[in-house]
């Protein structure tokens, strides 16, 4: 072999060895400091069960996707938003008319907020019907339910931020309902409002709650929720466990993860299309001295509670009817949180049927009452 050819081969081998050593050096440096070997082994060995209900596993990731969209678009809006009664409406108006694609970013933020709550509700009911809250996944359920309530809190606090007429009076009605809570209701209302009435102080407080307090609590719970889901794995419904002796499994990485990412891409395309075709309107600037517009209603996920309170008589024996309604919803919320500790016999067909019936009735009630509220003319 000619000398120059040998030299060329040695040069290529040396370059390849140097590149390998460099790559090994970087990975070795990272491995020495972060010990990623265990994480890599865990991800590569993690599996997702395959059965006729596997489609519901993707709802959690979809809800997470909408939260990521919320954070991303919210940060972009923060560059221009001014949280004061004098300039909040004008700053949102500026975003929608002067900032390039500002109207689209705001519309995506508003639509994704609603889709996130809808996804969280669907995820909750899918977990409920698949009995994925049974031992040892009790805390997965508890953290998930609390995150749903926090998502609704995001919606309530963010609703006021544009400082438009509809949001102003809806917030006024919502905080008045809070005042009904015995003992602490009045103090809680004044804390939320920053005084007796809905003013600029209320807007500032809602802004702080929306962009600082709720995100800090939500992200902490989200980290815990994702950790326990990864450690405990996906739950298999009791009925599937009994009928199918040998379950098939799919690797989490890359199979399940790539399917999840495909769903995110499709959801992003649909979200942008909805936001562009049906842009979120700004409305009219709030006037505290104006009368409330007819047919004032909260966001859709609060409508069934709002309508239910209207059905309750003003007095129930010696108790204010509104107090009974608010306390009733509080007890229902507590019961939902503690479902895993109430329904322990998930392998018992009779108790399963009872709890499934309760879930179906709840879904029908929410849909029917909300539909009646929207169809009613006030």
Image: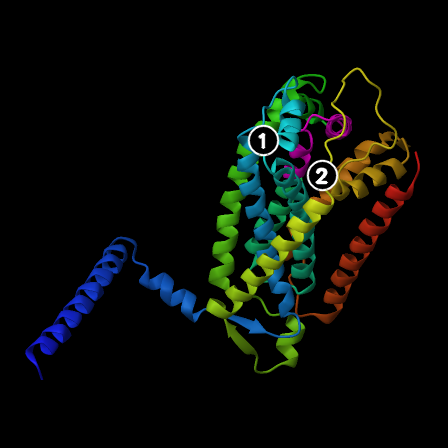
Residue 231 against residue 3 in the figure, above or below? above
Q: Is residue 284 left or right of residue 201?
A: right
Residue underneath mark 2: 280
- Residue closer to the observer: 249 or 312: 249
Residue 5 against residue 308 in the figure, above or below? below
**Residue placed farthest to the top in the image?**
289
Q: Position of residue 332 (x, y in %)?
A: 73, 46
> What's the residue at 26%, 53% (across, down)?
33
> What's the residue at 60%, 70% (across, down)?
236
Label 1 near label 2: C-beta < 8 Å?
Answer: no
- Residue closer to the observer: 320 or 333: 333
Q: Is residue 325 visible?
A: yes
Q: Quadrant of residue 329?
A: top right
Residue underneath mark 1: 209
Mark nearer the viewer, 2 or 1: 2
> What's the residue at 83%, 46% (across, down)?
370
Q: Magenta segment: does it hold 87?
A: no
- Residue closer to the observer: 185 or 12: 12
Q: Position of residue 135 (x, y in %)?
A: 57, 62
Q: Is residue 249 left or right of residue 109?
A: left
Q: Secondary structure at mark 2?
A: loop
Q: Secondary structure at mark 1?
A: helix
Range of the magenta residues? 153-180
Q: Position of residue 141 (x, y in %)?
A: 60, 54
Q: Magenta segment: does it hold 159?
A: yes
Residue 193 against residue 106 in the figure, above or below? above
Q: Residues within 10 Å of mark 1 (few under 14, many from 20)?
A: some
């Amino acid at each position: 072999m000619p000398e120059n050819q040998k030299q060329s081969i040695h040069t290529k081998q040396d370059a390849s060895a140097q590149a390998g050593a460099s790559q090994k050096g970087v990975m070795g440096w990272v491995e020495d400091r972060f010990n990623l070997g265990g994480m890599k082994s865990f991800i590569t060995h993690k599996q997702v069960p395959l059965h006729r209900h596997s489609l519901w596993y993707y709802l959690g990731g979809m809800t997470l996707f909408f939260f990521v969209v919320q954070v991303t678009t919210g940060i972009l809006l923060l560059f221009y938003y001014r949280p004061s009664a004098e300039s909040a409406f004008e700053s949102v108006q500026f975003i929608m008319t002067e900032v390039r694609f500002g109207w689209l970013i705001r519309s995506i933020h508003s639509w994704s907020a609603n889709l996130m709550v809808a996804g969280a509700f669907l995820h909750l009911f899918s977990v409920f019907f698949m009995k994925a809250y049974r031992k040892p996944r009790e805390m997965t359920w508890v953290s998930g339910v609390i995150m749903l309530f926090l998502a609704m809190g995001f919606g309530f606090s963010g609703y006021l931020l544009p400082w438009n007429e509809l949001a102003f009076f809806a917030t006024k009605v919502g905080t008045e309902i809070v005042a009904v809570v015995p003992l602490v209701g009045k103090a809680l209302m004044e804390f939320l409002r920053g005084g007796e009435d809905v003013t600029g102080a209320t807007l500032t407080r809602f802004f702080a709650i929306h962009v600082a307090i709720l995100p800090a609590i939500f992200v902490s719970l989200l980290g815990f929720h994702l950790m326990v889901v990864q450690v405990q794995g996906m739950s298999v419904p009791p009925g599937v466990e009994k009928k199918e002796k040998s379950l098939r499994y799919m690797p989490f990485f890359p199979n399940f993860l790539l399917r999840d990412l495909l769903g995110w891409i499709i959801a992003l395309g649909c979200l942008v299309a909805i936001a562009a075709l049906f842009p979120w309107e700004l409305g009219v600037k709030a006037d505290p001295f104006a009368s409330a517009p007819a047919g004032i209603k909260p966001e859709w996920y609060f409508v069934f509670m709002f309508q239910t309170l209207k059905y309750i008589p003003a007095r129930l024996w010696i108790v204010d009817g509104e107090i009974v309604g608010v306390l009733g919803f509080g007890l229902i919320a507590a019961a939902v949180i503690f479902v895993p500790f109430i329904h322990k016999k998930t392998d018992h067909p009779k108790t399963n049927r009872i709890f499934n019936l309760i879930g179906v009735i709840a879904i029908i009630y929410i849909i029917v009452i909300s539909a009646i509220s929207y169809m009613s003319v006030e």
